[in-house]
Amino acid sequence: MKIEHKEGYVLISSEEFSFSEFFTFFSNQHKDLTKNNVIINISSNLVANEEEISLFLEYADIHRKNGTSFIVVYQNVDMDKFPEIFNIVPTLQEAEDVLEMENIQRDLGF
């Protein structure tokens, strides 16, 4: 797992060979990231199914309650299979756009 501190968010990228390994590393590191906007970039080389991706819902809820964003980037997924409140997009650029929109909404009090 690679953790990069970018302007306005923390980017977490998968470098593992299995989703369970990546998720375990992420879970262990998350306690230090709850006050940050987080973008999870799951490599297209890492095969994950909807059930596995859904494991991030718990963390997305924590961030929503903290007033921060949590976005998953995974290009091999059908976004319609997830709740609307769960931010999952196919590209990093789209994740950054969602983050910017959510920051504007928070600034406006939504």
Image (cartoon, rainbow, N blue to C red):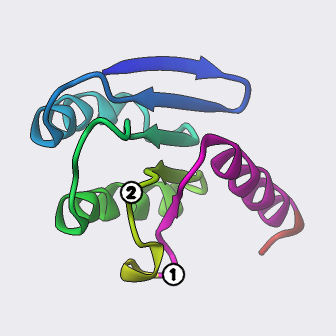
Q: Which mark is residue 56?
A: none
Tell us which disc is closer to us: 1 or 2: 2
Q: Residue 103 appears in which quarter of the rendering?
A: bottom right
Q: Is residue 19 left or right of residue 42?
A: left
Q: Could you tell me what secondary structure mostly forms the magenta stretch?
A: helix
Q: Which mark is residue 84?
A: 1
Q: Secondary structure at mark 2?
A: loop
Quarter in which the N terminus is drawn: top left
Task: Identify the magenta region.
Answer: 84-107
Q: Position of residue 85 (x, y in %)?
A: 51, 76
Q: Is residue 26 left or right of residue 100?
A: left
- Give the vertical position of 47 relative to 24 (above or below): below
Residue at x 33%, y 64% (from the top left corner): 57
Residue corresponding to mark 2: 76
| Total labels drawn | 2
Q: Is residue 1 magenta?
A: no
Most foreground residue, 20 or 8:
20
Q: Secondary structure at mark 1?
A: loop
Residue placed furthest toward the right: 108
Q: Earlier in the sequence, mark 1 or mark 2?
A: 2
Most foreground residue, 103 or 12:
12
Q: Is residue 101 magenta?
A: yes
Residue at x 52%, y 52% (from the top left corner): 71
Q: Position of residue 26 (x, y in %)?
A: 26, 34
